[in-house]
Image: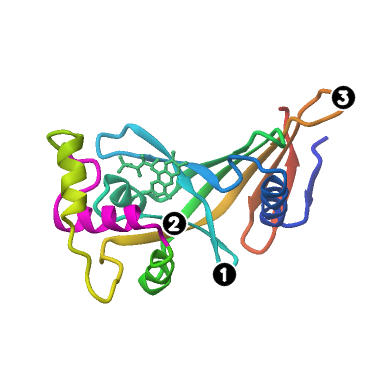
């Protein structure tokens, strides 16, 4: 007999778990790993800051990076949120959608100086991930970036909303030692929860 039932929104649970992780100073509370498929068909994964914009999950990156094209072209990406201080893992399958540039650019203005310079460097000198002669060349290049007056985000600063449709929550913190694994599928108007063998 399968225990299949409609349940509370797993996204609310993820939000509550992240809030708890921030409270206890979990170093991964604000992060996720996003996996996509590169042009050669190989998996590619990287750590990104997991943001919440007006109640939706989102990541910010730069359009000059190959991952931007991967996000645009893939039907879905896989996202992992690991909260070590809570012993909690979330695995999400998400579609991605563009964040309006105006939202990204407003938040970009709050970034520290170096990431701002880097974003302009990607735009005017060398795309993210390209080969550069050495670190000195990078530092000189960054120092030489002329930022616009008044300061604005470059057109390459961009973001994608992550819209999960499948969520797997694995909670290792069980007093009896048996991990609690729950799977949530979005069925168009509600989440359906199943318990899975961990
Ligand atoms: C803790 C941490 C947070 C990061 N956050 C971001 C981020 O929000 N956006 C981003 O583009 N890269 C972020 N990075 C860097 C990416 O993991 C990656 O190295 C970089 O984006 C280059 O990826 P690419 O080779 O696909 O262009 C972060 C790295 C770490 C370790």
Q: CA distance from mark 1 to mark 3?
A: 38 Å
- Labels 3 and 2 touching (C-beta < 8 A): no
Q: Which corner quadrant of the image does residue 105 belong to?
A: bottom left
Asked whether residue 112 is drawn in magenta, I would say yes
Residue topped by disc 2: 96
Q: Position of residue 104 (x, y in %)?
A: 40, 67
Q: How many marks?
A: 3
- Residue in view at x 32 percent, y 61 percent: 157
- Please tell me which of labels 3 and 2 falls first in the chain: 2
Residue beneath the point at 32% across and 58% down? 116
Asked whether residue 174 is drawn in magenta, I would say no
Q: Which residue is mark 3?
A: 176
Front in this rendered view, residue 54 or 115: 115
What is the spatial separation of the Cα atoms under label 3 and label 2, in whole angstroms?
A: 38 Å
Residue of label 1: 54
Q: Nearer the viewer, mark 3 or mark 2?
A: 3
- The first of marks 2 and 1 along the sequence is 1
> In whole angstroms, how far apart are the C-alphas of marks 2 and 1?
16 Å
Majority SS type along the magenta span = helix
Q: Which residues are magenta?
A: 111-130
SS of the residue under disc 1:
loop
Residue 18 in the figure: left or right of residue 97: right
The quarter of the image holding the C terminus is top right
Q: Is residue 79 above or below residue 98?
A: above
Quadrant of image for the N terminus:
top right
């Amino acid at each position: 007999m399968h225990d299949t039932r409609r349940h509370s929104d797993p996204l609310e649970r993820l939000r509550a778990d992240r809030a708890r992780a921030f409270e206890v100073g979990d170093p991964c509370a604000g992060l996720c790993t996003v996996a996509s498929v590169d042009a050669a068909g190989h998996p590619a994964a990287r750590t990104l800051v997991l943001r919440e914009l007006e109640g939706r999950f989102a990541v910010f990156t730069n359009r000059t990076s190959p991952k931007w094209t991967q996000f645009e072209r893939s039907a879905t990406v896989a996202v992992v949120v690991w909260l070590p201080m809570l012993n909690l893992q979330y695995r999400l399958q998400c579609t991605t959608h563009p964040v309006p540039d105006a939202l990204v650019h407003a938040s970009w203005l709050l970034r520290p100086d170096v990431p701002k310079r880097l974003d302009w460097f990607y735009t005017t000198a060398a795309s993210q991930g390209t080969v550069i002669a050495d670190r000195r060349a990078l530092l000189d290049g960054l120092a030489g970036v002329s930022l616009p007056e008044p300061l604005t985000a470059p057109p390459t600063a961009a973001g994608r909303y992550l819209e999960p449709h499948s969520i797997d929550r694995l909670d290792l913190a069980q007093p009896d030692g048996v991990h609690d694994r729950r799977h949530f599928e979005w069925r168009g108007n509600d989440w359906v929860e199943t318990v899975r063998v961990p």
